[in-house]
Image: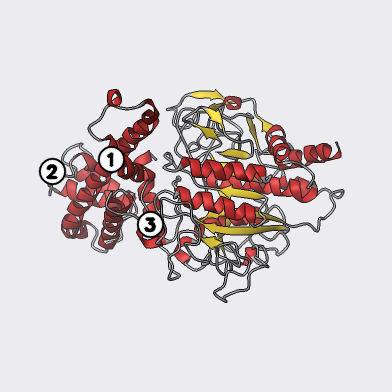
Amino acid sequence: MQKNHYLFVVAFCTLVGCNALKREPEPKQDQTKQTESPPWYIKDPVTDKVPGIALERFHAQKKVSKTANTIIVAVLDTQIDANHEDLQGQLWRNEKEIPDNALDDDHNGYTDDVHGWNFIGKKNGGFFSWGNLECVRIVRKWKNYFQNKDTTQLHEDDLYHFNEYQKALSDQRSQQKYYEGWRKSLQFRIGVYPEAKAALQKIFPREDYTLRDLDSVYKIYKINDKPYWERRDDNDRDLGALIDYMRAGFQSGQKSLDDIVKTKIDLDSILQRNLSLDYNERDFIGDNSQKLDKGYGNNKVSEFKANQKHSTEVSAILAANRDNKVGIRGFSNQIRIMPLCILLSGDEYDKDIALAIYYAVNNGAKIINMSFGKEFSLQQQWVTDAIQYAEKKKVLIVHIAGNNRKNLDDNSYFPSDYSYKDHTEISNNLITVGATTQSIDSTLVYQSSGYGKKNVDLFAPGHQIYTAKPNNLYDYDSGTSLAAPMVSGTAALIWLHYPNLSVTEVKQIILNSGTAYDLEVLIPGGEGKKAPFKDLSKSGKVLNTFNAMHMAEQASKK
C-alpha cells in the first residue's frame, strides 16, 4: 500500500475493532480457537528449515532449569483484552495500589492504576478514538511563525524546524487532497448505486453475483478501456460504467450501499479530525499539552472492545500461557504484561509516549515494547529524555521499523535512538526491529517493512503470524508490530535466567546471536531491486532465541 492509504486503514480499523497501527492489512482469515501446532515463527531454522526464532528448541532443552523469577514487560499500545483465556494470570498488578478506592495509594501520580494506565482516556472514564496526524500538529504549531518565510529570513537555529514544517505541510496537503478526491468519488457512487443495482438485477435476477461474475460481464459491456478511477467524475451512466462502479465496490470490500456510506463517514472523520488543523484531540483529555505533567487519563486499560485488538496480539506473542493447551505459546509464563494505552487513530502524542516510558520504568518494567511509530515528532526531546532515563535505569526498549517500506537511514521514524537533527546516537538501550517472512529466498524480508543499515538493528518474523485476538479468538496478522514482541520476549527470557547481565549486554547478545542468511533479497519499496540481506540492518541477521540464550549463558558466566 502507498503511504496515503494507511490512514484510512487506521481509521476504518479503529471503528470496526482493529488497531491504530499504520500497517499492511492481511486477507481475511477464519478466526478459530484451535491451536496451530506449532506456528512457523517459533520453529528452528536448522532442523525445520524455516527462518524461525528457535523458541521451542530452547524450551525443549532438558538442562534448562525453571525459574521462579518474574519480569515485567510494558506494552505501550492499545487497550488489551484482559479477560482473554490465553492471558489469564499474565497481567502485571500494582500491589501498592488498592483497587477502586479513588485514591493514589502509592503516590505515583496515577489514581487506582492497578493494571497500568490509559493515557488517552477521558477524566470521566471514557476514551476517544481519533487524533491528529503528527504532521498536522507540526503545521498547527509553526504555521503563524513560518508561513510566507524562506530560509534567507530565518536564524540558523530555526532551519531544522522550518524544514520539518515544510515537510509536514506538504504531507498534510497531499493527504488532504487524496482523501477529498476519494470522498468525492464515494459520494458519486452513493448516488449511482441504485441505478447500478437495478441494471445488474436484469443480468443476475437473484443478485447472487460475485466479483468474478462482475469481471466477466464488464468485459462484455464496457464501452471504453478507461478504468473506474479515471472516469469517476465523468458521470457515466452506460451499462459498462454501472458494472464498473459495482466492481470497484466489491474490490474494496464495499458490496452494499451501507458499506459505501460507512466508508464515506470514515473518510469524513479522517478529513475533519486526523487531518484538520481545527481539531485538537487534547481538548478531550483536558491536560496541558505544552507541559510534561502527569495525572490525566484514567485507569481503564481493558474497557473498550473496539480498541483491544492490537495490544492483545502483541501481548499474546510475548506472554500467552504456555501450558493451557489452547491458543499459542508465549515466551514464558513468568512474563507479566503492563498495559499502557497510547494508541488511537492518527499518530501517538509525544507526551503520552514519554510519560508512559517514565511510568514503565518507575513501576518496575525491565523491557518496554513499542509496536507503533510515526514520521514526525513534535516534542522529540521529551521522548529522547525518557529513553535516556530508561537507559540509566537499565531498561531495554524495543521499537518497530514500521510498515512504510522506507529506508530509516534516510527517512525519519520515531521514537528513535538516533537524532535525525544532529545525526548522532542518543542512547544504547533501544532495538529497532524489521519483519521477515517464512521464505528463505529473495522474499525473506516482508515487503512492507522498514529497513536500514544504520537505524534498523535486526529482523524478526512478522508475516502471517498466528496470535490471539479479543474474545478468545486466534488469527493471523502481519507487520513489524508482531516482530517487535519476539525481540522483547527474547530479552525477557535472557533476564529471567541471567539477571546479572546489563542492558547493553542483552542488546548486543540479541544482535550478535541472530541467524545470518547469505541471500540477495527484494528491497521493500525498491520496485524489484535487490540487495544482500546483511545490508538491510545493522546486524544483518534474523532473531534467534535459542542462540541468544546460549550466548547469554556464556556471558553470564564471565
Identify residue for label 1: 143
Point out which mark residue 106 bears.
none
Amino acid type, residue under disc 2 in the picture: Asp
Identify residue for label 3: 282
Mark 1 residue element: helix
Identify residue for label 2: 234
Q: Quadrant of residue 35?
A: bottom right
First reached walking from the N terminus: tag 1 or tag 2: 1
Q: Counting other residues with Cα less than 10 Å from the Cα at mark 3, is it few (<14), some (14-19), or many (20 or more)?
A: some
Horizontal side of 104 relative to 351 (left or right) equals right
> Is 546 in front, or is 416?
416
Q: Nearer the viewer, mark 1 or mark 2?
A: 1
- Name the residue at 19% across, 43% down: 222
Image position, residue 281 (x, y; %)? 36, 56
Amino acid type, residue under disc 3 in the picture: Arg
Q: Nearer the viewer, mark 3 or mark 2?
A: 3
Horizontal side of 215 relative to 189 (left or right) equals right
First reached walking from the N terminus: tag 3 or tag 2: 2
Q: Quadrant of residue 336?
A: bottom right
Quarter of the image containing the C terminus? Answer: top right
**Would residue 314 be visible to someone looking at this image?**
no
Q: Does the CB distance between marks 3 and 2 fall below 8 Å?
A: no
- Name the residue at 61% across, 57% down: 316
